[in-house]
Amino acid sequence: MRCKNKVLKLAFSGSKYRRIPDIYDLIKSKKYNRIVEVFGGSCCISNNMLRDKVVNQAVANDFDGYFEKFEENIIFKENLIKQLLQKGFKKSESMLSTEKQEYLKKLLSPIKEDKNLLAFLAKNFAHSAVRATETIDIKDFNYLRGELSTRQERLYYEELKNVQLYRLHYEDFISKYVQNDDKTTLVVLDPPYMNARQKQYQNTTYFGITETLKLLNLMKDKRNDFLFFNMRKDDTTALLDLLNLKYTYQTRLTSISKNNVREDFLAYITF
């Protein structure tokens, strides 16, 4: 199975759009009618698989509510960039002058508590290291960089409207949308990585080895084929072996920022 279309993607920390070809390769021997993405994030796996007709139905958990006001956020970005360009701002990889930083932060002050909107804007205004490891704050908005057009976001969101989005704790989401022994459904698990800093997530507790084991045991009881992402191959395969799960995998290095490279492990578990 190959990606016949250009991969749909968003500028979103932790997005798995680069893994779409790996996923298609791993599942090529099976046919699924439905995908259930438990930790949605940018929902790029369900969005691409539905658009590519790999499945006929897609359900995703937008736990952080990232897409609840996505269309409004696009309009805000368009108007903000228009204002900045009219004020003489120019797109550059260099940090803005102190005067322009202050002007930008003044424009952003009304939305300083809107974490989803700030995360959406961060690609253009914050350094990549900040986007990957910290909760976004307007104090970090010191640039005008990247793709200023919102064409890609609009195309992505237009396709995402075909995905059924919900907002639940992962256990409630699995209980409601994953049936036992459903061989027609592929479940995707991309939880906060147990070996990683997790400051960019809105979960109130650290998603460590205890929570990871709880999640894997839950899926073992469900006996549904699933994809599972985590950071390190050796640690993750040890857990999968401990639970006597049957799996194949692919792992690769991924860049979080210029000086921050980590392993990104993907397992395909079948029953």
Image: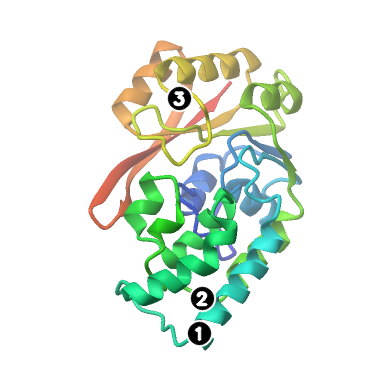
- Measured in 3D between alpha carbons, the distance from the residue under mark 3 to the one under mark 1, in whole angstroms, is 42 Å
What is the C-alpha distance between the residues marked 1 and 2? Answer: 10 Å
Q: Where residue 37 appears, x then y in whole percent?
A: 63, 37
* Label 1: which secondary element: helix
Q: Quadrant of residue 266?
A: top left
Left or right, 54 with respect to 136, comes to right
Q: Eyeballing the image, is 13 above or below 156?
A: above
Q: Nearer the viewer, mark 1 or mark 2?
A: 1
- Residue denoted by label 2: 148
Whether residue 165 is visible, yes or no, is yes
Asked if labels 2 and 1 touch by Cβ distance under 8 angstroms, the answer is yes
Q: Are the residues tagged 3 and 1 within 8 Å (C-beta)?
A: no
Observer-nearest of 72 and 54: 72
Residue 207, label in figure: 3
First in residue order: circle 1 vs circle 2: 1
Quick one: 86 or 201, which is closer to the camera?
Answer: 86
Q: Nearer the viewer, residue 157 or 109?
A: 109
Most extreme residue toward the left is 259
Eyeballing the image, is 22 above or below 220? below
Q: Position of residue 219 (x, y in %)?
A: 59, 19
Q: Which numbered disc, 3 or 1, marks the residue that appears first in the sequence?
A: 1
- At label 3, the amino acid type is Phe
Q: Amino acid at mark 2?
A: Leu
Disc ID at residue 85: 1
Residue at (41, 38) in percent of width and height: 199
Judged from the image, the secondary structure of the residue bearing numbered disc 3 is loop
* Mark 1 closeness class: few <14, some 14–19, many ≥20 residues within 10 Å: few
Specify the amino acid type for callout 1.
Leu
**Within 10 angstroms of label 3, few (less than 14), some, or many (20 or more) residues?**
some
Image quadrant for the C terminus? Answer: top right
Q: Position of residue 65 (x, y in %)?
A: 65, 44
Q: Measuring 35% from the left and 78% from the top, which residue is drawn there?
A: 92
